[in-house]
Image (cartoon, rainbow, N blue to C red):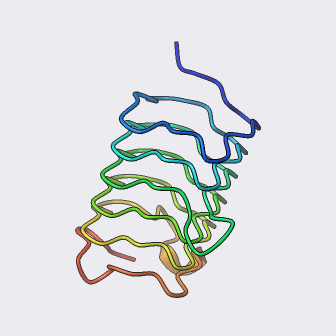
Amino acid sequence: MPVDYSGQDLHRRDFSGQDLTNANLTGANLTGANLTGANLTEANLSGADLSGADLYGAYLTEADLSSADLTDANLTGANLTGANLTGANLWDATLTRADFTDADLTNAFRRPGISRADMDGVKGLDTVKGLLD
């Protein structure tokens, strides 16, 4: 059974390498959380705060976010280096200063495209796979 952390304060929590497939993290406070290498396949992170209190947000390096729902999520300063976001929904997500170096964004940013995502200062877009608007 998937875990339900909806609306919970998980600030700086360490979820590195954990299996959070289909987890409900709707509206959760994940500021500064460590999700390095976590499996977040089909997880619901809509409205979640994955930003950082300072310059750095949540650590999602090498995380599997395939088919995850990140609608309206705050990913300000999040480190998504090498993350798999294949088919992820990033509609209305705040991506300011997020790092997408070597990430896979194939079929991400569902209709109507990335135009609704805040991409100010985003890093690594020249290295991502599958970025289409």
**Which residue lies at the image location 62% right of the left edge and 63% below the top edge?**
51
**Which residue lies at the image location 63% right of the left edge and 58% below the top edge?**
73
Give residue 116's position: percent from left, percent from top: 60, 76
Task: Find the residue positioned furthest to the bottom.
Answer: 121
Give residue 1's position: percent from left, percent from top: 52, 12
Q: Is residue 34 left or right of residue 13?
A: left
- Where, quadrant-wise, is the C terminus in this rendering? bottom left
**Which residue lies at the image location 60% right of the left edge and 66% below the top edge?**
93
**Which residue lies at the image location 55% right of the left edge and 69% below the top edge?**
56
Give residue 31's position: percent from left, percent from top: 64, 55
| 84, 9: nearer the viewer | 9
| Count of numbered circles on the image | 0
Task: Find the residue positioned furthest to the top.
Answer: 1
Give residue 15's position: percent from left, percent from top: 48, 36
Which quadrant of the view contains residue 13? top right
